[in-house]
Image: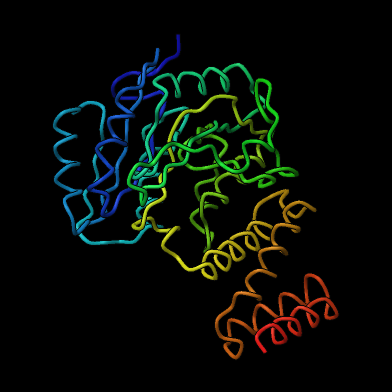
């Protein structure tokens, strides 16, 4: 039997939302359906949506008064600050563990939290864990649940170990299945990172202990037109991911290793190839990084091939 009470949850669930009226009720109800031997609480940051999201959040707060902390931003403060503020509230709740769920995804296993908490409680050398998940294409009329592309690459028998030398290969660590020890996350450092995203959180936790992908499916990751990442251009996706990995390598302890540098350099090459403006300052900055990270000869070859392909 784990500890925690109604005022001090054992697990805090982090959720931020903006214009998720089609999805947020299913997301919240999937959290409320969790069956645990400990107390948990859902912390939602609603960032001044222009659709019906806020009204739905208020309805759900009324329905689950003791299980939801709802933060209604007076102005739209943006995804990063909203995310940090909710993290801060999760920390202040004194919960031992924090789970993550985006408001457009949902959980399917009512024992998800229990299984993950039991694993971390019994394995002190692990700081974070994830599970498998299904993918749902919302743009399709009759969308079936699909297994992610990496599923066949991961041969798991009880779990797939993840550390700083293996994380991102393959990329199987998605936000909706994450649960980590609060003490493993340096919140002050996370706030200082200019290009932080979920990868920053993962590597901060992995700098304090190992991670594991548990061998069960616990949720559904939605792909839809309103998704922040899926609606972003290919260049912007790669470019921001590159800036994120560059920052991880330089700022997070123990992350300047071969695996991280390899992922960083791959994202840099992709950003150079996909850049829409070869005469911009941002393109020149990428070229400077390319020369610094993998040498002038390889970088020059990459630039030459880009112009050759365009011609």
Q: Can you give x and y, in whole percent of width and height, for residue 245 in the image?
A: 64, 59
Q: Is residue 119 left or right of residue 114?
A: right
Residue that appears at 18% across and 55% down: 51
User: Residue at point 59% right, 26% down?
Assistant: 214
Q: Is residue 299 above or below residue 43?
A: below
Nearer-the-camera pick, 305 or 125: 305
- Give residue 246's quadrant in the image: bottom right
Which quadrant holds residue 270? Answer: bottom right
Q: Spot the residue most to the front.
A: 142
Q: Position of residue 106 (x, y in %)?
A: 37, 36
Residue at 28 percent of width and 54 percent of height: 18
Residue 108 on image: x %, y %: 40, 27
What residue is drawn where x is 62% and y is 46%? Answer: 171
- Count the marks: 0
Front-lying residue, 135 or 158: 135
Quarter of the picture containing the C terminus is bottom right
Relative height, residue 210 to residue 299 (above, below): above
Against 31, residue 55 (above or below) is below
Q: Residue 111: where, in percent of width, then height?
A: 43, 19
- Residue ranking furthest to the right: 297
On screen, residue 155 versus residue 177, left or right, reads right
């Amino acid at each position: 039997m784990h500890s925690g009470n109604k005022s001090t949850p054992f697990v805090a669930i982090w959720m931020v939302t903006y214009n998720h009226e089609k999805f947020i009720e299913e997301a919240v109800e999937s959290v409320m359906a969790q069956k645990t031997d400990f107390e948990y609480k859902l912390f939602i940051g609603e960032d001044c949506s222009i659709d019906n999201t806020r009204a739905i959040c208020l309805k759900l707060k009324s329905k689950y008064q003791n299980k939801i902390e709802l933060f209604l931003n007076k102005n739209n403060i943006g995804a990063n600050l909203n995310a940090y503020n909710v993290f801060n509230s999760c920390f202040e709740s004194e919960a031992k563990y924090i789970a993550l769920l985006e408001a457009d995804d949902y959980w399917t296993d009512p024992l998800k939290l229990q299984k993950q908490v039991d694993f971390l409680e019994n394995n002190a050398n692990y700081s974070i864990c994830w599970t498998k998940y299904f993918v749902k294409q919302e743009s399709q009329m009759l969308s079936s649940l699909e297994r992610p592309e990496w599923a066949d690459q991961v041969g798991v028998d009880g779990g797939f170990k993840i550390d700083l030398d293996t994380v991102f290969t393959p990329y199987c660590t998605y936000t909706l299945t994450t649960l980590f020890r609060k003490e493993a996350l340096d919140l002050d450092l996370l706030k200082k990172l200019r290009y932080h995203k979920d990868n920053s959180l993962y590597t901060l936790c992995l700098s304090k202990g190992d991670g594991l992908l548990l061998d069960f499916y616990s949720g559904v990751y939605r792909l839809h037109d309103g998704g922040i990442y899926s609606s972003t251009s290919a260049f912007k996706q790669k470019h921001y991911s590159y800036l994120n990995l560059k920052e991880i390598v330089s700022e997070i302890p123990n992350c300047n290793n071969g695996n991280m540098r390899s992922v960083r350099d791959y994202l840099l090459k992709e950003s150079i190839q996909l850049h829409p403006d070869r005469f911009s300052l941002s393109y020149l900055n990428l070229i400077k990084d390319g020369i610094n990270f993998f040498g002038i000869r390889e970088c020059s070859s990459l630039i030459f091939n880009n112009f050759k392909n365009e011609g």
